[in-house]
Amino acid sequence: MTLKSGVLDPQGKAVRHALGALGVDGVGDVRQGKFIEIDLAESDPERARESVEDMCKRLLANTVIEDYVIEIGG
Amino acid sequence: MTLKSGVLDPQGKAVRHALGALGVDGVGDVRQGKFIEIDLAESDPERARESVEDMCKRLLANTVIEDYVIEIGG
């Protein structure tokens, strides 16, 4: 999950500022996001994706200000 | 960045609990982590990786309790 591109990201800004203070050069935009790793009993990837999509909409993501990407795997 | 596997993850536990309360079945372990997306001026992938490795050790990750993975790309 990341904040939508028009939404201010103070954590990202703080990281960028702190890197500057440490003398790290060449740092442009910094965005901070989060991810959630879920072990699912579902073995069908398509159904697993639908299930996670549902979780994102109902609970995990704040779709007003956040975008999310779902990855199903290993 | 994720919490190392032995470290308690209360956010992940809370998500798992909330999914159960919503009636979602088949959810096993849940771990929450964060990621930081950094635009770098460096065009050499090897040097970019070294630079990010350095940022992780000096600032971004708490290596006592967190593991981190670096991805360089597009």
Image (spheres, coloured by chain):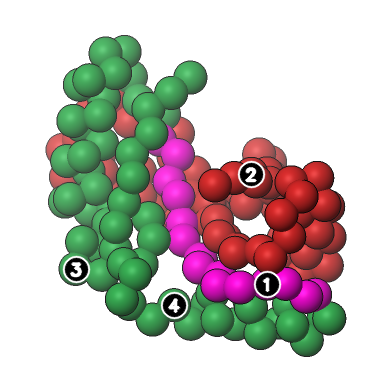
Chain colours: A red, B green
Identify residue type, mark 3: Val
SS at badge 2: loop
Q: Is residue A27 visible?
A: yes
The answer to whether marks 2 and 3 sit on the same chain is: no
Q: Position of residue B48 (x, y in %)?
A: 26, 24
SS at badge 1: strand
Label 3 chain ID:
B
Identify residue type, mark 4: Asp
Label 2 chain ID:
A
Which residue is disc 4 drawn over? Answer: B9
Q: Earlier in the sequence, mark 4 or mark 1?
A: 4
Decide: is B9 above or below B53.
below
In reply to whether residue B14 is colored magenta, the answer given is no
Q: Is residue A47 left or right of residue B52?
A: right
Q: Residue at x 59, y 45 (%)?
A: A73
State how far apart marks 2 and 1 are (Cα). Answer: 16 Å
Which residue is disc 3 drawn over? Answer: B64
SS at badge 3: loop
Q: Position of residue A22 (x, y in %)?
A: 16, 45
State how far apart marks 4 and 1 are (Cα). Answer: 16 Å
Q: Residue at x 31, y 13 (%)?
A: B43
Which residue is disc 2 drawn over? Answer: A71
Which quarter shows the N terminus of chain B?
Answer: bottom left
Label 1 chain ID:
B
In reply to whether residue B30 is colored magenta, the answer given is yes
Asked if labels 2 and 4 touch by Cβ distance under 8 angstroms, the answer is no
Identify residue type, mark 1: Val
Which residue is disc 1 drawn over? Answer: B27
- For this rendering, which residue is in front, A52 or A23? A52
Q: Residue at x 25, y 29 (%)?
A: B49
